[in-house]
Image: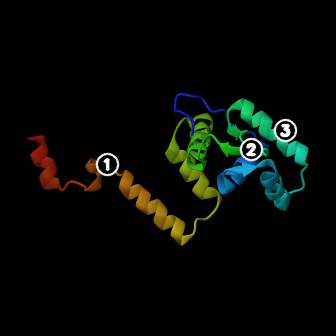
Amino acid sequence: MTPPSKIIPRPTESELELLRILWEKEPATVREIYDALNLQRPSGYTTVLKMLQIMTAKGLVLRDEASRAHVYRSVISQDAMQSKILKDLSVRLFSGSAAQLALHALAMEPASAVELDEIRALLETRRSPDTAKPQSNKTARNAKG
C-alpha cells in the first residue's frame, strides 16, 4: 500500500471495474484481470493492458515486473478507496455532511433488516458519551447550580 502522504487520484468507472477485480484476486496478471472482466462484459486484452499501464502511471496500481507475466496489485485497499470516494461525494453534494449523505442513500433504496441492525450498531459506537444517556431533570438541575 502507498503512504498516506501520497495523493491517490479518483479512478474512472473503467478503472474502478479493474480495481474491483484486483481487490478480489490480488495480485493478478493482465490475463487474469482480462478473463475476469470478460465474465462481466466483453473487452479486449490490449484494452485491459493499456488501462493497467495508465493506472500504473496514475499511481492506482503497482506492477511487479519480476516474472515474464507482469503482476499487478492495487495501491489502495477497497475500504480506503470507498472512504475516499464517499468523502469526496459528501463534500461536493452534501457540504461535507456524512449524515445527509447517509440519509439520502437510505431514502433512495430500502435497507434490509440486517443492514438496519448494522446501521444501529454503528450509531451506538459513534454516539458521544454526552448523548449516550439523557440527563434526568434532577441531574440537569444539579449541573446548573
List the residue tagged with mark 2: 67
* Image quarter hosting the C terminus: top left
Contact between labelled residues 2 and 1, with CB atoms less than 8 Å apart: no
Packing grade of label 2 (10 A; few <14, some 14-19, many >=20) is: few
Circle count: 3
Packing grade of label 3 (10 A; few <14, some 14-19, many >=20) is: few
Residue 2, quarter of picture? top right
Q: Please give left or right for residue 105 compared with residue 125 in the image.
A: right
Residues at marks 2 and 3, CA–CA distance in whole angstroms: 19 Å
Query: Which secondary structure lies at badge 2?
Result: loop
Query: Which secondary structure lies at badge 3?
Result: helix
Figure check: 64 above or below 28: above
The mark nearer the N terminus, 2 or 3, is: 3
Residue 128 is marked as 1
Residues at marks 1 and 2, CA–CA distance in whole angstroms: 52 Å
* Image quarter hosting the N terminus: top right
The mark nearer the N terminus, 3 or 1, is: 3
Residues at marks 3 and 1, CA–CA distance in whole angstroms: 48 Å
Front-most of residues 113 and 24: 24
- Residue 84 spot, x, y in % from top left: 58, 40
List the residue tagged with mark 3: 50
Question: What's the residue type where badge 2 is placed?
Answer: Ser
Identify the residue at image location x=54%, y=51%. Answer: 102
Front-most of residues 122 and 49: 49
Front-most of residues 94 and 19: 19
